[in-house]
Image: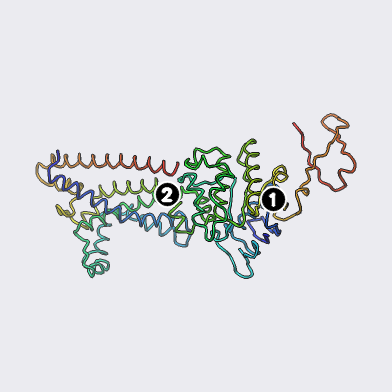
Amino acid sequence: MLTAAEWDVLALSVLIAGRAVLGALPVALLAGWMMARTRFPGRTLLDAVLHSSLFLPPVVVGLGLILLFGNDGPLGRLLAGFGVRLIFTANGAALAAGVMAFPLMLRACRQAIEAVDPQMEAVADSLGAGFWDRTLSVTLPLAAPGLIAAAVIGFAAALGEFGAVITFAANIPGETQTLALAIYAALQQPGGEAVALRLAGISFGVAIVALLLSEALLAYGRRRSGQ
Amino acid sequence: MISVAIRRRVGDFLLDVAFEGPGDGVTALFGPSGAGKSSTLAAIAGSSTIEAGRISLGDHVLFDSALGINVPPRARRIGWVFQDARLFPHLRVEANLRYGMKRAPGPRRIGFDHVVTVLDIAHLLRRGVRDLSGGERQRVALGRALLSQPELLLLDEPLAALGGAHKDEILAYIARLKADFALPMLYVTHSPDEVRAVADHVVMLDQGRVVATGDAAIIGGARIGARIVARERDGVLIRVPRGDVAAGDRLDLLIDP
């Protein structure tokens, strides 16, 4: 079946995409909730800024990350103080993939929160549940199917991300070389098409498994929230 | 004793309502749709903003614009029942019932088993709320509100979404609640039949104002026999016995089936 090298690339890809989702989902949820439930000046502008990685070329996003998180960037220096380096690392690849997947997750989270009837929250309020209490006990469980969808969309987007990852984290085998980057590297080698094709098949398999898993989770979530 | 005085403007509509209700029994807020009944309930529950006024429940002040008091909904100790029940769809019946109970501060005056027995919902506890009939939903909603240990129960047209037989069923349960739990209730309705069935006290609203208060007799509806004395083309002349009505009385015409 798969060679040891192919397993390594697959495991690294899943790890990087998983970390990207883990990091981006809470932020997307918070921002999505703000967009769905609050009104404040500059809201539309903030929305546009949060969506910027959707319309910028990925290489520009990678460049932005280098400027911010590179060894000379302000956030890069700050993190270096804690002994954390992101550029050219797996965590950096996850950051780049997460930033690229963020707008898609934001949209899905926002729609999930908007789909929750605010009257349910008002009922919880009248039954003695404060803001965090009702958010955890009513809003999030009712939004769960949409939030699962957000995570799956984010995972798929992070898994396939190329431009921002290669710009910020480079193409280092075993460290930042995900499936997409490995396919690109294979195509640079003479006669590498066969290797590239096998990796492409693996990508396809991961996509199918993720999709089936999300369908199962969605069905479970719908049953739980009675929708 | 509940005391309400509120002023609130919504677009062109001015809600300017003041009334007092007894600390026990059912007070009906009665009037045509658009009279401001539900807006008044929302103000009492604390889910809408009021410009000026004072709302108190016994010696517990819930809102006072002069003193800057505005108790948040969750601390008002008010149970709210809606016409569409609004049960939590992700929770089973028992978890719905216990939602407010778990969060109620202080002693549990109103017991779980007692409520379940009075409302006949013991056999529904394990069910999901999607599997309930309209009447069952409304009973669970009543139970959920009661178990939050409220000092006042608000019933916002609780029968409006139900069919005829279920209406009578729920009315009977509300009468049992009245008998079993010493709890004031505010009951919003535009149905004279419901007022006659459950209300001890009536506050009649029209166009955002209180137009009359008193017992259930003020809505009239004491049925008097009328007799058709003449028909002419499309017109019908009706005679009402002298003494039953006086000049200035309002007459509603009900055609018995």
Q: Are marks 1 and 2 in contact (CB under 8 Å)?
A: no
**Chain letter, disc 2 residue:** A
Disc 1 marks a residue whose amino acid type is: Ala
Apparent side of residue B106 relative to residue B187 in the rendered image (left or right): left
Under tag 1, what secondary structure? strand
Picture coordinates of residue B72 (x, y %)?
Answer: 55, 62
Disc marking residue A121: none
Using the image, tell me which numbered label, if any, was put on residue B28. 1
Colour style of the rendered protein structure? rainbow
Mark sitting on residue A141? 2
Q: Residue at x 64, y 65 (%)?
A: B59
Mark 1 surroundings within 10 Å by alpha-carbon count, few (fewer than 14), some (14 through 19), many (20 or more): many
> Is residue A5 found left or right of A106 in the rendered image?
left
SS at badge 2? helix
Q: Amino acid at mark 2?
A: Pro
Are both tags, 1 and 2, on one chain?
Answer: no
Front-lying residue, B36 or B3: B3
How far across and how far down the image is residue A14, in percent? Answer: 23, 48
Q: CA distance from mark 1 to mark 2?
A: 36 Å
- Residue extending farthest left: A190
Where residue B205 appears, as percent x and y from the top left, is 71, 52
**Residue A160, percent from left and from top:** 25, 47
Judge left or right: residue B227 versus residue B185.
Answer: right
The C terminus of chain A appears in which quarter of the rendering? top left
Residue A111 visible here: no
The front one of A167 and B9 is B9
Residue at screen point 73% across, 55% down = B210
B36 relative position to A70: left or right: right
Image quadrant containing the N terminus of chain A: top left
User: Dot 2 surroundings within 10 Å: few (below 14), some, or many (20 or more)?
Assistant: many
